[in-house]
Amino acid sequence: MKSHGFEVLEWAGQSPDLNPIENLWNHLDKQIRKRRPLPLKKEEFIEAVQGEWKSLPLDYIRALIESMPRRAEAAIKAKGWHTKY
């Protein structure tokens, strides 16, 4: 990573405080749970997830991406403890 010009942070990249994918999974989960009838079969669930994934608002995804500097700053300030993210 460093040889390609990426700045590597000193803590685990899987931190929920830093990883916006957790917010995306939560959004998808909420959208699927609103469906009536709920998808009960595996095929229905896969179709529901794919449908919700395709309908994700681009602005929502952009907001998650743009939140990364704030997430990193909050994690640094918290010195490894929890943040609002």
Image (cartoon, helix red, strand yellow):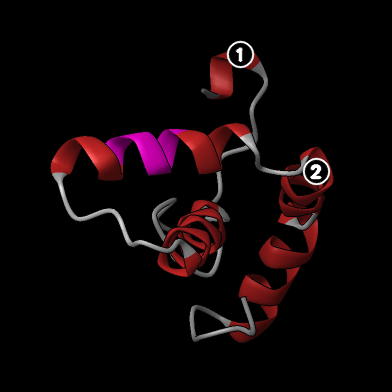
The image shows residue 40 at horizontal and vertical percentages of 19, 55
Q: Residues within 10 Å of mark 1 (few under 14, many from 20)?
A: few
* Closer-to-camera residue (36/51): 36
Residue ID at (79%, 38%): 58
Return the residue at label 2: 62
Quadrant where the C terminus is found in the figure:
bottom right
Residue corresponding to mark 1: 4
Q: Callout 2: 10 Å neighbours few (<14), some, many (20+)?
A: few
User: What is the secondary structure assignment of the residue under circle 1?
Assistant: helix
Seen from the viewer's position, the closer of residues 71 and 78 is 71
Q: Position of residue 73 (x, y in %)?
A: 74, 68
Apparent side of residue 2 relative to residue 48 in the rendered image (left or right): right
Q: Total marks drawn?
A: 2
The foreground one among 51 and 74 is 51
Asked if residue 28 lies left or right of residue 60, the reply is: left
The percent coordinates of residue 4 (x first, y second) are: 61, 13
Q: Quadrant of residue 59?
A: top right
Q: Main secondary structure of the magenta part?
A: helix
Q: Which residues are magenta?
A: 46-50
**The label number, if any, that marks residue 49 in the structure image:** none
What residue do we see at 77% from left, 58% from top?
67
Residue under the image location 67 percent in, 20 percent down: 5
Q: Disc 2 vs disc 1: which is toward the camera?
A: 2
